[in-house]
Image (cartoon, grey):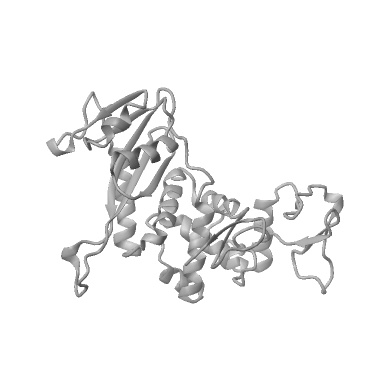
Amino acid sequence: MAQAPIQNRAFYEEDAAREALEAVRWPDGPSCPHCGNLDREKIAKGQGKVHRPGLYYCAACNGQFTVTVGTVMERSKIPLSKWLFAMHLMGASKKGMSALQLSRMLGVTYKTAWFLCHRIREAMTPDQRGPIGGANKVVESDETYIGGKAKNRAFAKKEPKKHAVLALVDRDGNSYSFHIANVKADTLRETINKAVDSKSHLMTDELLSYGSVGKQFAGHSTVNHSADEYVRLGGFAHINTAECRFSLMKRAVFGTHHSISEAHLSRYLAEWDFKFNTRKMNDGERATLIAKGLEGKRLTYRPTDGNHQSRSVH
């Protein structure tokens, strides 16, 4: 998966795609997703024309499985080669890729591309965000609003709704963003306390809501943007890293997605977090990490009754 797109057989050959996914998911050999069996002597690969490629049997639970079982690709009719190509394209597109563009490149319908995008974003979503920071570390916090402007309306009578987004950035580590109801102190405190280590030094702007929040951390410094103050204390006090995150987010909105619904905003935030946190990886490494994130998750139109993690899309 680390090859260039045109040279990678996994992007247009099903057998190569399946083998690439198996190598990522099962580097030490297949394991049963039903019972967790790791004993290779109790796992047999289906042979002959009567068995579909990549089918395995587990003697421990008498179950059968393929590499897609227990992932967001389970029961998908989309070819595995298109899955892998979509992972590469979404991971390599710095400002995102629209479902319309993906549908044209993969040769699938818009509905298929849209659902495919959200499944891949689910693979990009970490099981837990934080805590980031720690002793002698600085975490920047900033907030912004994503949504259209009233002055840009052509015919719509209703003013577009603005959605508040909070970004937290460990200057020496990862960054996570959250869709929040508002920027009141109680709302910020609840989100920040869960995502940031209390031993951190919190860095914010002059928003009054941060006053009480900052008292819960080892240190709290601010910069006053309303007074044209952006850096002080010899370059220590600033939130430029968090503002950079918002700049990248808004370039993705303005240049690629144009309009993002409130219901799915958190998925786009997860994608932008993933790309920022993997910015030092190459495209192949990023695509491999996405493939690993597919495991243990399900994203369906309605909840399933299985044991896998399931989230419905409406």
Residue lying at the far left of the rendered structure: 227
Q: Quadrant of the N terminus?
A: bottom right
Residue 153, given in percent of the width and then of the height, sits at 19, 69
Residue, x 77% and y 52% (percent of image)? 35
> Is residue 305 or residue 115 the one in the foreground?
305
Residue 160 visible (yes or no): yes
Find residue 235 and report its image quarter: top left
Relative to residue 240, is residue 256 depicted above or below?
below
Whether residue 218 sits left or right of residue 287 in the image: it is: left
Relative to residue 240, is residue 41 depicted above or below?
below
Whether residue 229 sits left or right of residue 5 in the image: it is: left
Total label count?
Answer: 0
Residue 6 visible (yes or no): no
Whether residue 192 sits left or right of residue 2 in the image: it is: left
Residue lying at the far front of the rendered structure: 186
Find residue 78 and report its image quarter: bottom right
Residue, x 28% and y 36% (percent of image)? 239
> Is residue 180 or residue 122 the one in the foreground?
180
Residue 213, given in percent of the width and then of the height, sits at 32, 32
Residue 166, given in percent of the width and then of the height, sits at 34, 45
Residue 156, given in percent of the width and then of the height, sits at 22, 73
